[in-house]
Each structure stands twice: as C-alpha cells, then as structure tokens.
Image (tube, rainbow, N blue to C red):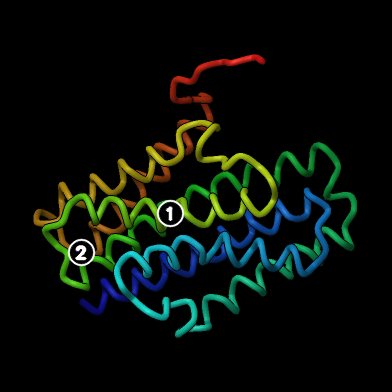
Amino acid sequence: MLVYSKINIILEIIGTVAFASSGAMVAIRKNMDIFGTIVLGVVTALGGGCIRDIILGITPPNMFRNSSYAIGAVLASIVLFVVFYYKKDFFKARVLKTYENIMIVFDAVGLGAFTVTGINTAVELGYVDDKFLLIFVGMVTGIGGGIIRDLFSNEVPFVFKEQIYAISSFLGACFYLAFRNIINADALMIGSAVVVVITRIIAVKYNLNLPRVNYDS
C-alpha cells in the first residue's frame, strides 16, 4: 500500500506540472498577461480533479483542502511565463516546434497520470464495482481541465476536434479495470498510464482522428 501511495503522489505531481504547463502555453499563445497565464495553468491542472471530486461528493474539492498542488501549478505557470517573457527567441519556429513536441509528451503523461489517479480516488471511496463510474471519473479527471482551459481561451475544446485524446484516457481506464484483480496496485497504475501515453503519442504521430462531418456553411 505504501508503494501504491507513493506512485499515486508521483503521478499527481507529474500530471499537475504537465497540465499547468500546457495551460500556461495556451495563455502565452493567446497573449494573456501573467494573471491569465496563471489562471489557465491552474484550471488546466486542477479543473478535472475538481469536477471528479464534485461528482464523488468530496466537498470542498481536494484542490481547496490541499493547496500544494495549486501552488505547484502556479509556480509551473509562472516559470513558463518568465521563460517566454525574457527569451523571445523561444518563439522562433524551430525552437517552438521542439518545445511543442516536448509538450505533447508531457501532456500525454499528464493525461495518463490523471486518468489513473481519478480512478484511484473512486476506488478508495469504495466504488470498486461501479465500472461506468470508475471509467467516467478517470476520463473526467484526465480531460476536464483541458476542456475548461479551451473554453476560457474561447476555443472549441481540443478533445472534441483533434486526434484521439479522450479515447486514450478511455483505453487506459479499461486497462485498469481489466487487470485490477490480476496485477498488483503499483504495476497496475504504471501500466494503465503507459497505455494512455502510448496510444496518445501514436495518435499524434499518425494524426489519427475520429470520423467527423466536414460541414462548410
């Protein structure tokens, strides 16, 4: 159980930093000031977990009871803002492309981490047999913050239009449920997160998308 708890904490830290960075990057691209950058970073990192807690009846949500993750999200957002504020050459196409590739990996890792920790929260509350709930809260934790981020930045949520994103979270959640009684907890968490990361990166590499109607008004 001790190993399980440590891995859970590590995944939450990774997810928080990764998603805060992605939120801050969107704000920087939208020419928001430092306050807007911090807000977008925080809601991206903690928004999904907040929605999860409300669904599970955890009030107030954990983000308001344990400020360490919010502080981490704020710091990650500030660091990214300062770097881009003083290093204008980061906006050059080649440098920015390299950074964006790194962020794709971090975002995939964050998605995997939060999908797993979302399910863990429900399991720890005793909802071990409610498969739909476990998958739902896992996905909400993984994609909820990004949806809020895009709405705040006046964009159609990325998850609804670009590549396979939510499906990666779904597959990771299904892996968790399928092997929950077969492998030990720490291997289960790592394996589930890896499934999310791999499927997400494959989707980006090969530009895999769900079917859509190309409506041109």
Query: Percent x, y for residue 23?
Result: 64, 56
Query: Percent x, y for residue 169?
Result: 37, 45
Q: Is residue 123 above or below residue 198?
A: below
Name the residue carrying label 2: 185
Amino acid, disc 2: Ala
Instruction: Identify the secondary structure beneath mark 1.
Output: helix
Say which residue appears at 60% left-offset and 70% top-offset: 73
| In front: label 1 or label 2 | 1
Say which residue appears at 80% left-offset and 63% top-offset: 83
Name the residue carrying label 1: 142
Say which residue appears at 75% left-offset and 64% top-offset: 36
Amino acid, disc 1: Gly
Say which residue appears at 73% left-offset and 70% top-offset: 78
Query: Percent x, y for residue 114?
Result: 41, 59
Q: Dividing the picture into quarters, in which one does residue 104 lie?
A: top right
Q: Dividing the picture into quarters, in which one does residue 121 lie?
A: bottom left
